[in-house]
Amino acid sequence: MCGIVGYAGARPALQIVVDGLRRLEYRGYDSAGVAVLTETELLIAKRAGKLANLDRALAEDADGRIAAGSVGIGHTRWATHGGPTDRNAHPHLSQDGRVAVIHNGIIENFASLRTQLEAEGIEFASDTDTECVAHLLAAELRTISNTSGPAALAEAMRRVCRRLEGAFTLLAIDKEAPGAVVGARRNSPLVVGVGDGESFLASDVSAFIAHTRDALELGQDQVVLITPEGVEITDFDGKPVEAKPYHVDWDARAAEKGGHDWFMQKEIEEQPQAVADTLRGRVGTTGNILLDEVRLTDQDLRDVDKIFVVACGTAYHAGLVAKYAIEHWTRIPCEVELASEFRYRDPVLDRSTLVIAISQSGETMDTLMALRHAKEQKARVLAICNTNGSTIPRESDAVLYTHGGPEIAVASTKAFLTQLAACYLVGLHLAQVRGIKYADEVASVVEQLRSMPDAIEKVLASMDGVRELARELSSQNTLLFIGRHVGYPVALEGALKLKELAYMHAEGFAAGELKHGPIALIDQGTPVVCVVPSPAGRGVLHDKIVSNIQEVRARGARTIVIAEEDDEAVVPYADHLIRVPRTPTLLAPFVTTVPLQVLACEMATARGHDVDQPRNLAKSVTVE
Ligand code: M6R
């Protein structure tokens, strides 16, 4: 939610900042803007709409003075306070034009700050909460007399942050602080890139990965000052802080489209590799499952008597699938909750509760708040996350990273499959530690999991029919999805993808629930996607869904059936058949989800939508 970039070095900042914004545009695309410090001036350019509008404005800039500065900040916005207009686009300037500020998050006490500032004679130029930070910074800078330049800017930022409530990542530059960018973070992401004679700040590493793969994790409530000479970090009171360095294990190519029209297509194709990478190196010498960071003892895990999975959107669907495996393998009751609802219903949590927080970005505010609530109640928290150093894993007691590489498209695809793989590893680990599964049993499930990349590859190689079907269905108004057991969350995920990308009415149902109401939606020709479990697994499940397919067909539905390659029982009832390889029942979502991702991507393309940047959405949702 909002992308932020800052650069301080010897090279021209504008190009570096704009290139960084291009990689962060998935975080929000309501407007884009930059501010650059030259030797004599602070210059800004900003435009409502996508980054392309800013590109055009910069290209038309006749004198090109803005290209000269070697310090810059840039912002791509997902609007919260104030509509997506030019005047509300970031950066925002202080009234005296001395300071420029960009912001991600929400400043919750902005209304009272604005009232105070207006009473002091400040005239606001926008409707944003951010602008008050620019005015506050300028006011603090006027009062600081014992320091100057970058040090004064950092001190002003600390003073302002102590007055702010809510969630924020802030970057600021000051005409009187040449060569410096100051940043601050509370409950919102910010990472530092350490280059050779240059430094970077960004919402995530993809913004500077083309320049350096060495990064620093910033903690909560910290202020960072970057200059070409280096990086200084303090807490909000000015106490120096040692940041944890890390090396990013992927390079700039991973964050490019690689010949595809959409990042989403590329990320769908990357799924076999992403799942293989998530599973790699997970089994220790004694057959034990290895997590990444564990600040829990085996005894803590043996004491667990209840599991809650908390997550949002696609990650929530991964949790719904995982519940079947976790309960089956560990015999511990497992509930899956929407993170945005979790803390408001006062869940029963204690020290023997394990909360599993799933998040691709590691920054989703709803999930973070659920996690914090769980920790306040003394529950243990284990994070499944794709983003190294992000807030959710940092605040958890144990972490398993999915090694999916960067996911740029707003619609989650490889995150879903890698989250499934990670959840299954956690389930196996728990079962093993608690003595329910022996190493050889665990090894046999891990072997099945390791065969999933090949199975996904096979599905990907047979998607031509799905693409054709997508074009045929693209003029429909409604599409329904049904499934049972692990196929039910797959149905929900298929519907979510279609809603967010094709902007059409799509709903997923537990197939058995249809007859309790939703079957009334079926009309002549209504397309219904049916996710069929393996006939070789639990036969009763398979038989039941075959009956459900007949029920909808009898009422006029056009059935699109996803079934295993040798499942002949479904043939008479399928208007369109999508074949997937044979898989154990619990692992079926690894293959049945893929055609639904392709269907949504192709339908959105056929309807003329921007697949990677669907309307009203952003990749990383850092507000509640
Ligand atoms: O980064 P997270 O995994 O925490 O994100 C959670 C959801 O916002 C995300 O999965 C969202 O639902 C996707 N856009 C769906 O494709």
Image (cartoon, rainbow, N blue to C red):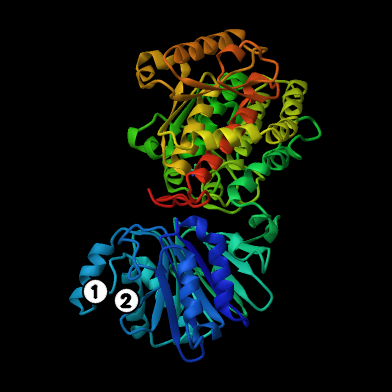
Residue 67 vertical placement versus 423 (above, below):
below
Q: Residue at x 41, y 60 (%)?
A: 30
Q: Which residue is at the far right? A: 285
- Pointer 1: what residue? 117
Question: What is the x, y in percent for residue 529?
Answer: 51, 25
Circle 1 crowding by C-alpha within 10 Å: few under 14, some 14–19, many from 20: some
- Pointer 2: what residue? 135
Helix, strand or loop under label 1: helix
Quarter the N terminus occupies = bottom left
Residue 589 lies in what quarter of the image?
A: top right
Q: Is residue 309 visible?
A: no
Question: What is the x, y in percent for residue 541?
Answer: 56, 11
- Amino acid marked by disc 1: Leu
Q: Are marks 2 and 1 in contact (CB under 8 Å)?
A: yes
Q: Nearer the viewer, residue 519 or 309?
A: 519
Question: What is the x, y in percent for residue 372?
Answer: 44, 44
- Amino acid marked by disc 2: His
Left or right of residue 211, residue 608 in this image: left
